[in-house]
Image (cartoon, helix red, strand yellow):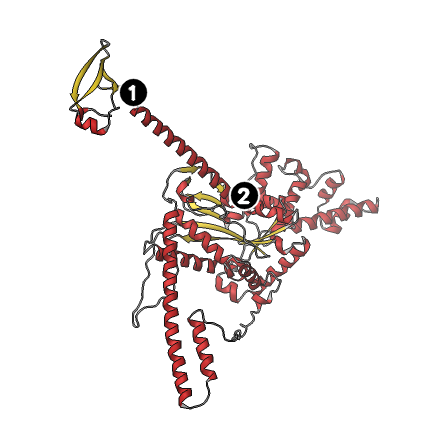
Amino acid sequence: MPRLKGKKWEEREKLIEKAMTHYRESGNSASLRISAETFGISWSTLRDRLNGAQNRREAHRAQQLLNEDEEGCIVRWCQRMDDWGFPLRLSLVKELAAYLVSKRKGPGYKLGQHWLSRFLDRNPELSSRFSGRLDRQRAVTNNQELLRDFYKKLKEVTAKYDVLPKDTYNMDEKGFMMGMCAKVKVICRAGRKNPHLTHSGNRTWVTVIEAVSGTGVALPPMIINQGTAHYKGWYAGVEHQDIATFAYSPKGWTDSKLGMDWLVENFDKYTSEVAQDRWRLLILDGHASHTTWEFFDYCLNNKIIPFCLPPHSTHLLQPLDVGLFGPLQKHYSNVLDEAMEQSGGDTGINKGTFLNYLFEARRRTYTSHNILAAWAKTGIMPYNPRRVLQPTPLSASTVLVVSGPTTPKNTRMARSTASQALALIRGGSKSAEKLRTLVKQLDKGLQISLTEKEIGDHVHAQFRKSVAKKASQASTKDRKQLSKARVITTEDVERLKKARDAADSKKAAQALAREVEKRSLGKRVTISENISVHSIDTSLDVEEVEDSEWSKVIVEDTSSRRSCRKRVPSKRVQD
């Protein structure tokens, strides 16, 4: 008889229990065969069970590496991950079980080849299914049920764990090619096709991990540079207010180790004090860098709920993708263009200057208004699924109210004041016509003067900024190594830079002291194997040395210890 599994096995066990009960209650009036045939089981199986035999599952329970309670924990974890939008891969479940076995039994114990299938047999509340792979078009247009299910689970989780808006976060990665700018509109001659702007062309990849809260707060980023260590030149322009976590990888990409470092050294560090032992909700996508057992284990042990977005839906449901990463890229391109203009067309960019441009772009992008607008557009906070399921049309444009006449301070105000003055001049008389002409001429002259002043002010401001920047700019090409640690923070950068500067200063002071000692009186300088200069007379002034044809040098013969005075030309005397 083939081995039964799952529900069929459970149904057979129930029939055996009923047959045993029927036989015991009937006394001697029914035989084993009658009770067995009544419930459709083998009489020998009924006989063995009545004699104390166990079913196959209970009989082999002592041979299992994990007991029933430990497997129950795995079952509940799998169910919880499924409810949060992370249906687990088979390899991840087996990895978790192997981790528990190594903790309980030691490194010498390994799971069997068929452990996973038998684990599913022992726990029929779980089942394995092929996950659906949806392309972007189907996810957007044809799978409204997927989005509804996301909002339903989100509401259930936030209600169950009483998650507050300030404890709700969204994280995602953003990649930069540090020298590449986005396309922008430019002004050129009419009829010209494909105008070009010069940019650095530096394609070095940098990954930035960002996180924002539901109350409009942006957490410090984690910046992953391409390299094998941290170098001083990378952080030449980093200031105290530029709080971040810095890391490196061979290609500038994130991985599971860096994802775990971000969770511990960045997210938990900056949110645990705000949460005050409340549950935190972390909304993220299914990237492999944050779907590991260690990542989930740390989350659950520290009251963090990792809530996964549906596949191919980040452009609809992820606040960072919907309303922040686009403006961030735009502001970064603008900052890069401004830097090129200020430097007179110098398009060079490296890892040191990149951080300055990135922090400035972040300051322009991550305002409270922009972050709250991004959350609202996804329908997550405030909770409003109709923003995604049934988008509302755009509202009418705002009507601008023109205030009363004021002293014009720029061309726009001058034009508005002139228009108001012309509207007040009524009638068709010659005097009225002359007055209108004079107002128009005054308007034209005033606009020209104000425009030239504004252009001059802007050029002068940019020039002053460029001069100040060149005067205060630290070297960003310093290749002195700061640390080999994989992840460091802004505080670590400042501490390591100070330590490196102190070591360099000490080294320079020692070199200077050696040079001074070498040039001082009484320094023995070896000329040959047996002869050395013991003392050089440097007390004469420069003019006296030039006028004197000869200088005195005391030469000591180290082989015979005899001293003699020799007269040599002064031009041969060296310090």
Q: Nearer the viewer, mark 1 or mark 2?
A: 1
Q: Earlier in the sequence, mark 1 or mark 2?
A: 2
Of 480 and 166, nearer the camera is 480
In terms of image quadrants, where is residue 442?
bottom left
Of 41 and 469, nearer the camera is 469
Badge 2 marks a residue whose secondary structure is helix
The disc label shown at residue 168, or none: none
Q: Which quarter of the image is occupied by the C terminus?
A: top left
**Residue 346, above or below 549:** below
Where does the image place residue 347, in percent across and percent down from the top left?
A: 33, 54
Camera sees residue 217? yes
Query: Are the two marked residues, 1 and 2, in contact with CB atoms closer than 8 angstroms?
Result: no
Q: Is residue 202 left or right of residue 97?
A: left
Camera sees residue 120? no
At x 41%, y 50%, the residue is 354
Where does the image place residue 103, in percent across and percent down from the top left?
A: 60, 35
Labels in figure, total: 2
Where does the image place residue 165, in percent across and percent down from the top left?
A: 62, 56
Where does the image place residue 235, in percent across and percent down from the top left?
A: 43, 44
Q: Is residue 335 left or right of residue 273?
A: left
Of 228 and 98, nearer the camera is 228
> Which amino acid type is marked by label 2?
Glu
At x 48%, y 58%, the residue is 364
> Which amino acid type is marked by label 1?
Lys
Q: CA distance from mark 1 to mark 2?
A: 55 Å
Badge 1 marks a residue whose secondary structure is loop
Q: Is residue 368 left or right of residue 191?
A: right
Residue matched to label 2:
265
**Residue 385, above or below 470:** below
Residue matched to label 1:
523
Label 2: few (<14), some (14–19) or many (≥20) C-alpha neighbours in 10 Å: some
